[in-house]
Amino acid sequence: SNRIGNLGAKALGAMLKDNKMLHTLELGHNIIGAEGGIALAQGLDENKFLVCLELQSNRIGAEGALEFARVLDEDNIGKTGLSTLNIACNSIGDVGGSKMQAIA
Protein backbone atom coordinates (compact mmCIF):
# COMPACT_ATOMS: atom_id res chain seq x y z
CA SER A 1 0.00 0.00 0.00
CA ASN A 2 1.15 3.46 -0.92
CA ARG A 3 -2.09 5.06 0.31
CA ILE A 4 -2.96 6.02 -3.26
CA GLY A 5 -6.43 7.51 -3.41
CA ASN A 6 -8.64 9.02 -6.07
CA LEU A 7 -6.28 11.90 -6.86
CA GLY A 8 -3.36 9.55 -7.51
CA ALA A 9 -5.56 7.15 -9.48
CA LYS A 10 -6.77 10.02 -11.68
CA ALA A 11 -3.15 10.94 -12.45
CA LEU A 12 -2.35 7.30 -13.24
CA GLY A 13 -5.46 7.04 -15.42
CA ALA A 14 -4.31 10.07 -17.42
CA MET A 15 -0.85 8.51 -17.77
CA LEU A 16 -2.34 5.25 -19.04
CA LYS A 17 -3.90 7.06 -21.98
CA ASP A 18 -0.42 7.72 -23.36
CA ASN A 19 1.35 4.65 -21.92
CA LYS A 20 3.54 2.75 -24.33
CA MET A 21 5.89 0.99 -21.88
CA LEU A 22 4.14 -0.11 -18.69
CA HIS A 23 2.83 -3.69 -18.85
CA THR A 24 1.86 -4.30 -15.21
CA LEU A 25 0.45 -1.90 -12.66
CA GLU A 26 0.02 -3.10 -9.09
CA LEU A 27 -2.25 -0.84 -7.04
CA GLY A 28 -3.64 -3.35 -4.58
CA HIS A 29 -4.34 -2.44 -0.95
CA ASN A 30 -4.71 1.30 -1.46
CA ILE A 31 -7.65 3.65 -0.91
CA ILE A 32 -8.84 4.11 -4.50
CA GLY A 33 -12.57 4.82 -4.62
CA ALA A 34 -15.12 4.83 -7.42
CA GLU A 35 -13.86 8.11 -8.87
CA GLY A 36 -10.30 6.77 -9.13
CA GLY A 37 -11.49 3.43 -10.46
CA ILE A 38 -13.45 5.16 -13.20
CA ALA A 39 -10.38 7.23 -14.15
CA LEU A 40 -8.20 4.11 -14.33
CA ALA A 41 -10.78 2.29 -16.45
CA GLN A 42 -11.03 5.22 -18.83
CA GLY A 43 -7.23 5.30 -19.05
CA LEU A 44 -7.32 1.73 -20.33
CA ASP A 45 -9.66 2.59 -23.18
CA GLU A 46 -7.53 1.97 -26.28
CA ASN A 47 -4.37 1.23 -24.21
CA LYS A 48 -2.82 -1.81 -25.88
CA PHE A 49 0.27 -1.99 -23.65
CA LEU A 50 -0.97 -2.61 -20.11
CA VAL A 51 -1.74 -6.32 -19.73
CA CYS A 52 -2.15 -6.66 -15.94
CA LEU A 53 -3.89 -4.32 -13.50
CA GLU A 54 -3.99 -5.33 -9.84
CA LEU A 55 -6.61 -3.37 -7.89
CA GLN A 56 -7.52 -5.81 -5.13
CA SER A 57 -8.54 -4.42 -1.74
CA ASN A 58 -9.48 -0.91 -2.76
CA ARG A 59 -12.86 0.83 -2.72
CA ILE A 60 -13.91 1.10 -6.36
CA GLY A 61 -17.41 -0.21 -5.66
CA ALA A 62 -20.08 -0.95 -8.25
CA GLU A 63 -19.54 2.37 -10.04
CA GLY A 64 -15.88 1.58 -10.74
CA ALA A 65 -16.67 -1.99 -11.74
CA LEU A 66 -19.33 -0.80 -14.18
CA GLU A 67 -16.81 1.48 -15.90
CA PHE A 68 -14.29 -1.37 -16.19
CA ALA A 69 -17.06 -3.55 -17.64
CA ARG A 70 -17.88 -0.82 -20.19
CA VAL A 71 -14.25 -0.42 -21.25
CA LEU A 72 -13.61 -4.16 -21.40
CA ASP A 73 -16.91 -5.04 -23.09
CA GLU A 74 -16.74 -7.24 -26.19
CA ASP A 75 -17.51 -4.21 -28.36
CA ASN A 76 -14.12 -2.82 -27.31
CA ILE A 77 -12.13 -6.02 -27.91
CA GLY A 78 -8.87 -5.14 -29.58
CA LYS A 79 -8.81 -1.61 -28.18
CA THR A 80 -7.22 -2.64 -24.89
CA GLY A 81 -4.42 -5.10 -24.22
CA LEU A 82 -5.56 -5.92 -20.69
CA SER A 83 -5.72 -9.64 -20.01
CA THR A 84 -5.70 -9.63 -16.18
CA LEU A 85 -7.79 -7.41 -13.91
CA ASN A 86 -7.91 -8.15 -10.19
CA ILE A 87 -10.72 -6.26 -8.44
CA ALA A 88 -11.20 -8.67 -5.53
CA CYS A 89 -12.31 -7.11 -2.23
CA ASN A 90 -13.69 -3.88 -3.73
CA SER A 91 -17.33 -4.09 -2.62
CA ILE A 92 -18.58 -4.15 -6.21
CA GLY A 93 -21.86 -5.73 -5.12
CA ASP A 94 -24.31 -7.77 -7.18
CA VAL A 95 -24.66 -5.21 -9.98
CA GLY A 96 -20.90 -4.81 -10.48
CA GLY A 97 -20.37 -8.54 -10.16
CA SER A 98 -23.04 -9.31 -12.75
CA LYS A 99 -21.53 -6.87 -15.25
CA MET A 100 -18.03 -8.22 -14.72
CA GLN A 101 -19.26 -11.79 -15.12
CA ALA A 102 -20.94 -10.83 -18.39
CA ILE A 103 -17.60 -9.79 -19.92
CA ALA A 104 -15.58 -12.72 -18.53
Image (cartoon, grey):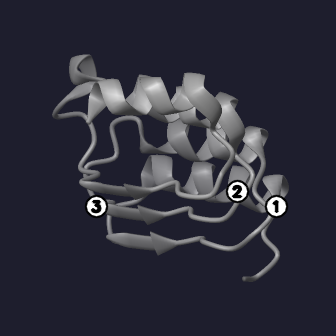
| Residue 88 placement (x, y as % from top left) | 53, 57
Disc 2 + disc 1, Cβ < 8 Å? yes
Can you tell which mark lies on residue 64? none
Q: Residue shown at 52%/40% (left/top)?
A: 41
Distance in Å between CA atoms under marks 1 and 3: 22 Å
Categorize mark 2 by other alpha carbons within 10 Å: few (<14), some (14-19), many (20+): many
Categorize mark 1 by other alpha carbons within 10 Å: few (<14), some (14-19), many (20+): some
Q: Residue shown at 64%/33% (left/top)?
A: 93
Place residue 57 in its image quadrant.
bottom right
Q: Earlier in the sequence, mark 3 or mark 2?
A: 2
| Residue 81 placement (x, y as % from top left) | 23, 49
| Residue 44 placement (x, y as % from top left) | 43, 44
Amino acid type assigned to the residue bearing label 3 in the image: Val
Tag 3 secondary structure = loop
Residue at mark 2: 9
Q: Residue shown at 52%/54% (left/top)?
A: 87
Q: Which residue is the extreme one toward the front?
A: 94
On the picture, is 40 further left or further right than 9?
left
Distance in Å between CA atoms under marks 2 and 1: 6 Å
Q: Which residue is the extreme one toward the top?
A: 75
Amino acid type assigned to the residue bearing label 1 in the image: Gly
Tag 1 secondary structure = loop
Can you tell which mark lies on residue 51? 3
Amino acid type assigned to the residue bearing label 2 in the image: Ala
Question: Is residue 72 among the parts visible in the rendering?
Answer: no
Residue at mark 1: 5
